[in-house]
Image: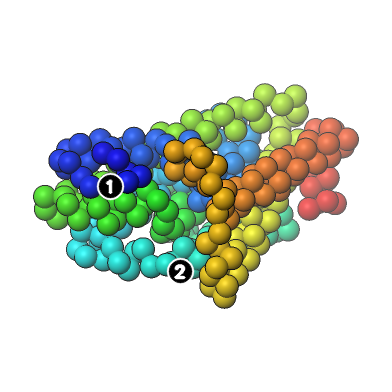
């Protein structure tokens, strides 16, 4: 199957194996709908297990969304799911959720609870006083999943419509999401493990986690909202791209999506991490919460 020149399906069984591999690639390559959110909550959890939960929660909601969209695409809604400006609307929604989450973490020192009834059904995770809860990653995952890219377009327009019947039409999206889940759990664990190994006390780690997660989500939310708004008003500015010569989706071009990852994770994320670690070291573990109060 050559997705670059002729994305036709061969048999639906091979299609399903292929979309799982596509999910693995999607999960490990820098993507504006996955890495900024996984990074934020993984650092905020400041542990390997917490980072794995962050990647798992985000990706499970993403997987559910992809399965629903795959089923909808089977029933001839692919045209709606791949509208030219649909991505910008998703940018706006994701940005608003990120911005509100970051604001509440930074300035209210608590997590925004948009779906409390759903959170009560989930396993217990760290409370606000100990770190940044990762339950909200579920909402992020479901909202972000409605964004479309090369892989999603292939699934919605080529693979899902060719499933043998409606009973299995959700499987392409499900397996694609599970492939993404595997890699996001690994990435989340790596981010959380790195934070866990810092020579900081529990209070200092909690402060750094809140500081980094809050700043990354807040700044990332602003950038997403700006990108979505600009894209709706000036579509041409969102469609530019520079080829990298790599035959790997998400890495084949330098575009707005890749720049969002660089600015959010590489810019806001790592600069906040550096500044947060300096503050925690300066004030000491026992005074980390006081540092958080004085320097939100």
Q: Residue at x 15, y 41 (%)?
A: 11
Residue 229 visible in the shown view: no
Q: Is residue 2 left or right of residue 54?
A: left
Q: Is residue 75 left or right of residue 236?
A: left
What number of labels is visible? 2
Q: Label 1: state its secondary structure.
A: loop
Label 1 and label 2: CA atoms lie apart by 23 Å
Quadrant of residue 65 in the image? bottom left
Q: Label 2: state its secondary structure.
A: loop
Of the two numbered discs 1 and 2 on the same chain, state the one appearing first in sequence: 1
Please rate how many residues cluster around mark 1, counting C-alpha atoms within 10 Å: few if below 14, some from 14 to 19, many from 20: some
Q: Which mark is residue 85?
A: 2
Figure check: 115 above or below 214: below
Please rate how many residues cluster around mark 2, counting C-alpha atoms within 10 Å: few if below 14, some from 14 to 19, many from 20: some
Residue nearer the viewer, 46 or 152: 152
Tell me where residue 206 appears, x and y as whole percent: 70, 39
Figure check: 192 above or below 152: above
Q: Which mark is residue 78?
A: none
The furthest residue to the right? 282
Tell me where residue 296 appears, x and y as whole percent: 78, 53
Q: Residue at x 84, y 39 (%)?
A: 279
Q: Nearer the viewer, mark 1 or mark 2?
A: 1
Figure check: 161 above or below 249: below
Q: Which residue is mark 1?
A: 7
Q: Residue at x 38, y 67 (%)?
A: 83
Question: Where the N terminus falls, by quadrant?
Answer: top left
């Amino acid at each position: 199957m050559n997705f670059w020149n002729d994305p036709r399906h061969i048999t639906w069984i091979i299609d399903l194996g292929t979309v799982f591999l596509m999910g693995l690639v999607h999960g490990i390559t820098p993507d504006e709908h996955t890495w900024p959110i996984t990074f934020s909550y993984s650092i905020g959890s400041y542990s390997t297990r917490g980072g794995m939960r962050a990647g798992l929660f985000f990706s499970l909601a993403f997987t559910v969304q992809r399965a629903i969209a795959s089923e909808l695409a089977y029933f001839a809604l692919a045209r709606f799911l791949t509208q030219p400006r649909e991505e910008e609307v998703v940018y706006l929604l994701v940005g608003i959720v990120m911005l509100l989450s970051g604001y509440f973490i930074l300035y209210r020192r608590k997590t925004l609870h948009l779906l409390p009834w759903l959170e009560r059904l989930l396993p217990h995770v760290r409370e606000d006083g100990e770190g940044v809860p990762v339950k909200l990653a579920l909402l992020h995952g479901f909202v972000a999943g409605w964004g479309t890219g090369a892989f999603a377009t292939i699934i919605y327009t080529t693979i899902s419509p060719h499933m043998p019947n409606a009973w299995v039409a959700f499987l392409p999206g499900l397996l694609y999401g599970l492939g993404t889940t595997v890699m996001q759990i690994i990435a989340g664990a790596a981010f959380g493990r790195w934070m866990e190994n810092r020579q900081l006390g529990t209070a200092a780690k909690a402060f750094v986690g809140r500081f980094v997660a809050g700043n990354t989500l807040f700044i990332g939310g602003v950038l997403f909202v700006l990108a979505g708004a600009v894209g709706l008003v000036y579509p041409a500015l969102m469609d530019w791209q520079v080829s990298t010569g790599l035959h790997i989706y998400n890495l084949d071009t330098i575009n707005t999506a890749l720049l969002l990852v660089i600015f959010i994770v590489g810019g806001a994320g790592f600069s906040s991490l550096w500044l947060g670690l300096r503050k925690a070291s300066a004030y000491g573990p026992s005074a980390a919460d006081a540092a958080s109060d004085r320097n939100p």
